[in-house]
Amino acid sequence: MEVAALVAVIVVVAVLIIFLMNYITRLKFERKFRQWQETEALRWEAEIEKATKAAVTQSRAVLGGKFT
């Protein structure tokens, strides 16, 4: 009986460790993904702003400064 109880405890502990490691790993990768997502959003905003400024500059150059 003691051997069966010991095996059961070991199995339960192993399963708990596996679930805990899975949870910790998932949290870690979700945090990295959120950081990457924020970085990409900032990069996209910067590119859009840069493209907008370039378009305005090009438009002004084509129009020769009219309408400004």
Image (tube, helix red, strand yellow):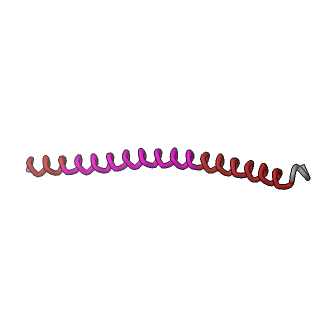
Compare residues 38 and 60 and report the one nearer the observer.
60
Compare residues 59 and 5 and report the one nearer the observer.
59
Side of 50 where 35 appears, left or right: left
Q: Residue at x 41, y 44 (%)?
A: 28
Q: Position of residue 23 (x, y in %)?
A: 37, 48
Compare residues 67 and 13 and report the one nearer the observer.
67
Quick check: is 49 in the magenta stretch? no
Magenta span: 11-40
Q: Residue furthest right?
A: 67
Q: Main secondary structure of the magenta part?
A: helix
Q: How many labels sit on residues?
A: 0
Q: Residue at x 68, y 51 (%)?
A: 48
Q: Position of residue 21 (x, y in %)?
A: 32, 46
Q: Position of residue 34 (x, y in %)?
A: 51, 47
Q: Position of residue 17 (x, y in %)?
A: 27, 46
Q: Residue at x 81, y 51 (%)?
A: 61
Quick check: is 20 in the magenta stretch? yes
Side of 6 where 61 appears, left or right: right
Q: Residue at x 8, y 48 (%)?
A: 3
Side of 16 where 1 appears, left or right: left
